[in-house]
Image (cartoon, rainbow, N blue to C red):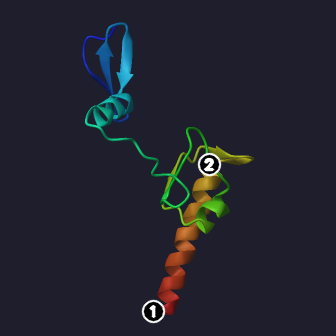
């Protein structure tokens, strides 16, 4: 059992008896306690694309659906994290060059 609050990569873990409660669980409890509901900011019409481990869909589909915040980039089918990050880096570079050429 933990005796103090511990932080793991910005996730706060608080000791509650023999179990640990993650901050998002506490957030949910607090939101519900004031009569509000949690919402999905990653739904189709919103700018986030979230998946626990790996991309929620192909990188090109993320661009086509105009997603702005993407997590996690760990993998997508046969693409590893390095290839996925290179895809988005190359896209940012091409966009910046295109913007400079149009100016």
Going 54% across and 83% down the picture, which residue do you hit?
98
- Residue 18: % across, % down: 37, 7
* Crowding near the residue tagged with mark 2, few <14, some 14–19, many ≥20 C-alpha atoms within 10 Å: some
* Crowding near the residue tagged with mark 1, few <14, some 14–19, many ≥20 C-alpha atoms within 10 Å: few
- Residue 77: % across, % down: 73, 46
Q: Is residue 33 above or below residue 96?
A: above
Please, what secondary structure does the residue beneath circle 1 have?
A: loop
Q: Is residue 60 above or below residue 77?
A: below
* Quarter of the view holding residue 7: top left
33 left or right, relative to 51: left
Q: Nearer the viewer, mark 2 or mark 1?
A: 2
* Residue 85: mark in rendering: none
Going 62% across and 68% down the picture, which residue do you hit?
64
14 left or right, relative to 71: left
Placement of the C terminus among the 4 image quadrants: bottom left
CB contact under 8 Å: marks 2 and 1: no
Please, what secondary structure does the residue beneath circle 2 have?
A: loop
* Residue 56: mark in rendering: 2
């Amino acid at each position: 059992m933990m005796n103090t609050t511990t932080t793991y990569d910005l996730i706060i873990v608080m000791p509650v008896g023999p179990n640990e409660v993650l901050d998002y669980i506490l957030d949910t409890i607090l939101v519900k306690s004031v009569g509000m509901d949690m919402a999905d900011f990653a739904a189709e019409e919103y700018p986030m694309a979230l998946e626990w481990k790996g991309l929620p869909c192909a990188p090109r589909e993320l661009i086509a659906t105009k997603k702005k915040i993407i997590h996690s980039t760990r993998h997508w089918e046969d693409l590893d994290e390095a290839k996925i990050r290179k895809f988005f880096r190359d896209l940012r570079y091409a966009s910046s060059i295109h913007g400079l050429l149009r100016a």
